[in-house]
Image (cartoon, rainbow, N blue to C red):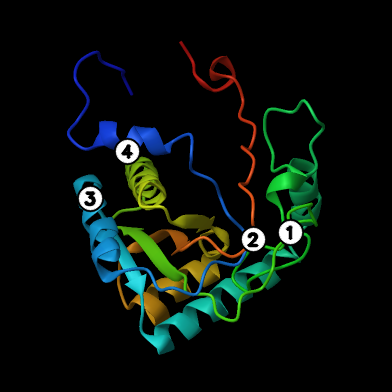
Amino acid sequence: MQVHTGPAESGLAELSRAIEERRSDRRPFGAAPVPASTIARLVAGVTRYGATLHPVIDPGARRRLDEVLADAGARQRFVPGYAAELTIWSHRWTAARDGVPAAARTVHATHPDLRAFPRGALAAARPPHDGSILLVLTTVGDEVLDHLLAGEAASAVLLTATDQGLATTPLSQSQEVPATRARLASSVLHSPDHPQLVIRVGHPGPDPGRIGRTPRRTLDAVLLH
């Protein structure tokens, strides 16, 4: 990949303002549903990357997707070393530039679809109803370039939702287990495409306070000159 000088692509400059505001919110979301016009905007925004975004709206499909996510989480708990790895990058020292700090993790599980992180310090009140929607990002191919384009498409979804004042949570567990990834494609989406990421989108929940920024590694640590 090469970086070139010049004007920003149309629409992308506007999304850049959401970069500093985006957070992975693992708390319950609000009860209000995501507007259909917003869902349509998110769906349209990934087509430039050759990806497809599938809103899982049908109750039967949503139930099957919930089952797939739960199955993936259960399988991962028995993967040798998985629990230790999760603990290592979830419990970072104060000056660490990576990992998920306690301030970004809830005290207890707040939603059946969320990955079971070690307990954190983030309060999470349960509203009577969570109006979030799950969106599945897919690509036709499954090569390195497809993964890169899927990452760009996921970024567009997350930043567009943030710009619209919505909360988001990326859910990757069903794609990390081959059996559940295949089941997601066949029984939930009924599509030959390759699922790359599930994204939870909804209105911010009733909990007060803004989630702190997760630390990131320095540019020199991740970019080769």
* Circle nearer the viewer, 4 or 3: 4
In terms of secondary structure, where does tag 2 sit?
Answer: loop
Q: According to the image, label 4 marks what residue?
A: 15
Q: According to the image, label 1 marks what residue?
A: 123
* Circle nearer the viewer, 4 or 1: 1
Q: Disc 3 residue type?
A: Gly
Q: Is residue 211 above or below residue 16?
A: below
Q: Is residue 140 among the parts visible in the rendering?
A: no
Contact (CB < 8 A) between labels 2 and 4? no
Q: According to the image, label 2 marks what residue?
A: 207
Q: Residues within 10 Å of mark 4 (few under 14, many from 20)?
A: some
Distance Cα–Cα, label 3 vs label 2: 37 Å
In terms of secondary structure, where does tag 4 sit?
Answer: helix
Whole-percent x, y for residue 134 in the image = 44, 69
Q: According to the image, label 3 marks what residue?
A: 50
**Residue drawn where x is 53% and y is 71% of the image:** 180
Distance Cα–Cα, label 2 vs label 4: 26 Å
- Image-quadrant location for residue 107: bottom right
Q: Reading the chain from its start, which is encountered first: label 1 or label 2?
A: 1
* Circle nearer the viewer, 2 or 4: 2
Distance Cα–Cα, label 4 vs label 3: 19 Å
Q: Which of the image's four quarters has the N terminus?
A: top left
Q: Reading the chain from its start, which is encountered first: label 1 or label 3?
A: 3
Whole-percent x, y for residue 94 in the image = 80, 30
Q: Reading the chain from its start, which is encountered first: label 2 or label 4?
A: 4
